[in-house]
Image: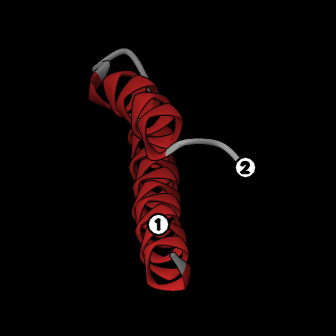
Amino acid sequence: MKSAQAYQAKAAEIERLARDLCQPPELRSELRAIARQWRHRAELADWTARQLRASHASVL
């Protein structure tokens, strides 16, 4: 499983592309939507990692 940081980095890279004014407006809009998806994956990865740490801590 990828880390939340890896997903955040991917979202930031895509967001930079979306800010490029040379890109057509439709593509920029699509890139922003994809960046949101990557940020959501980052949040899920972070949540999953916290849940795993909590469950391991409760077992010990």
Report which residue position mark 1 lands on: 53
Q: Indicate the colouring scheme.
A: secondary structure
Residue 18: image x %, image y %?
A: 37, 32
On the rendered structure, is 58 left or right of 56? Answer: left
Q: Which is nearer the N-term, disc 2 or disc 1?
A: 2
Q: Circle 1 — which element?
A: helix
Q: The disc labelled 2 sits on which kind of residue?
A: Met
Which residue is rendered at x = 45% and y = 54% of the image? Answer: 42
Residue 42 vertical position relative to residue 28 in the rendered view, above or below: below
How many marks do you count on the picture? Answer: 2
Which residue is rendered at x = 72% and y = 49% of the image? Answer: 1
Which residue is rendered at x = 45% and y = 84% of the image? Answer: 58
Residue 20 vertical position relative to residue 49 in the rendered view, above or below: above
**Cα gap from disc 2 to disc 1, whole angstroms:** 15 Å
Residue 54: image x %, image y %?
A: 42, 76
Residue 15 falls in image quadrant:
top left
Report which residue position mark 2 lands on: 1
Q: The disc labelled 1 sits on which kind of residue?
A: Arg
Do residues under tags 2 and 1 come within 8 Å of each other at their CB atoms? no
